[in-house]
Amino acid sequence: METLLDALLAFLVLTGAVFTFIGSLGLARLRDFYTRLHGPTKATTLGVGSLLIASAIYFSTRGDGVSLHEVLVTLFLFITAPVSGHLLAKAALHLRMKSLTPPPRDPS
């Protein structure tokens, strides 16, 4: 039972590390403000959420009781990251910030 739990924790930590790395890499490497928003709002949110869930499972099984701190931080992260990304995009549109990607073509 303990090895299955360790395997689950290792999977969650590795998944979180990969998502966080990909999100950070996207933030650093993408060339446009609008495309850079995807790194921290999507991939990094999933990565940090996975790490926090792994931490909650670890401290709940090895500690004195259920660890709800990580669950509350995860919920806060999942609520605030999309909202902040939306507000940043809305502010950029309000400032008429140009996108480097061409607009989609009309199929007709």
Image (cartoon, grey):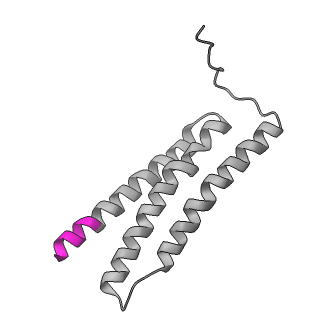
Quadrant in the picture for the C terminus: top right
Q: Which SS does the magenta portion mostly show? A: helix
| Quadrant assignment for the N terminus | bottom left
93 in relation to 21, above or below? above
Residue 14's x, y, as percent?
Answer: 33, 58
Q: In this view, does 105 lie above or below 13?
A: above
Residue 73 figure quarter: bottom right
Q: Within the image, what quadrant is residue 37 found in?
A: top right
Query: Could you tell me residue 71's position as x and y percent?
Result: 48, 73
Give 99 or 24, whichever is nearer the viewer.
Answer: 99
Q: Name the residue located 23 percent from the left edge and 71 percent from the top edge.
A: 6
The answer to whether 92 appears left or right of 21 in the picture is right
Q: Residue at x 31, y 85 (%)?
A: 62
Question: Which contiguous range is marked in magenta?
Answer: 1-8
Look at 67% across and 26% down and name the residue there.
100
Residue lying at 78% horizontally and 34% vertically, measured from the top left: 97
Q: Position of residue 103 (x, y in %)?
A: 66, 20
Most extreme residue toward the right, as rendered?
Answer: 95
Q: Is residue 81 magenta?
A: no
